[in-house]
Image (cartoon, rainbow, N blue to C red):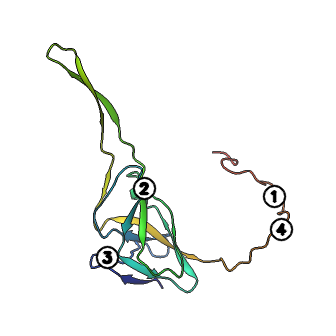
Amino acid sequence: MVKVKLLHAEAHPPTVAHAGSDLGYDLYAIEDVVLPPGVPVKVRTGIAVEGPPGWGFILGDRSSMAARGITYAGGRIDAGYRGEILVCLLNVNQPSYSVRVLRDADGGIADVELVSSDASVHIRKGDKIAQMSPFEARTVLPVEVVEELSVTERGGKGFGSTGR
């Protein structure tokens, strides 16, 4: 069971469209927010949550937000955290730029302006902004320092080593 405390009059409890097959619960914004490009913004949900003992939550993108150029900028909800869930969103859209040439009365160039489009994205109160997935904390596993790790076929090959 996921327990939810509503901390704000405009708060919505998390919802799931297809219980048992969806990987996360939808979280909602409780206020209007403007997301300028390239600036992480903490968006309030107005809720606090509690999972089963030893369970926390991982937040992640909603595909509909990602399609608008909005991504989740990281963080976890630890099992013992009881404060408001804030969702850090990042607008990865880039403004487009154009040059406007201003001419004088004789047709000569009087000035040149650099004009940019507004790439800000507006989040409205009540919008679904992220998903919250339950996750069992396994940090009770002991940590042991060793001289060597076991050998595998992959070894230390990382980013892109298995192809595109």
Q: Residue at x 16, y 13 (%)?
A: 106
The dot on residue 152 is: 1
The residue type indicated by label 1 comes to Thr
- For badge 2, the amino acid type reads Leu
> What label sits on residue 146 in the rendered view?
4
Q: Is mark 3 on a helix, strand or loop?
A: loop
Picture coordinates of residue 78 (x, y %)?
Answer: 54, 76
| Residue depth check, mark 2 versus mark 1: number of the one nearer the observer | 2
Label 4's element?
Answer: loop
- Sequence-wise first label, 2 or 4: 2
Mark 4–mark 3 contact, CB under 8 Å?
A: no
What amino acid is at disc 3? Ala
Among the 4 quarters of the image, the one containing residue 89: bottom left
Q: CA–CA distance between discs 2 and 4?
A: 39 Å
Q: What residue type is labelled 4?
A: Val
Q: What element carries label 2?
A: strand
Marks 3 and 2, how far apart in space?
22 Å
Q: Residues within 10 Å of mark 4 (few under 14, many from 20)?
A: few
Q: Circle 3 sits on which residue?
A: 11
Which residue sits at x=43%, y=79%? 83
Q: How far apart are marks 1 and 4 (CA)?
A: 16 Å
Residue at horizontal 33 percent and vertical 46 percent from the top: 119
Which residue position holds label 2?
90
Q: Which of marks 4 and 3 is nearer the N terminus?
A: 3
Image point (34%, 81%), residue name: 7
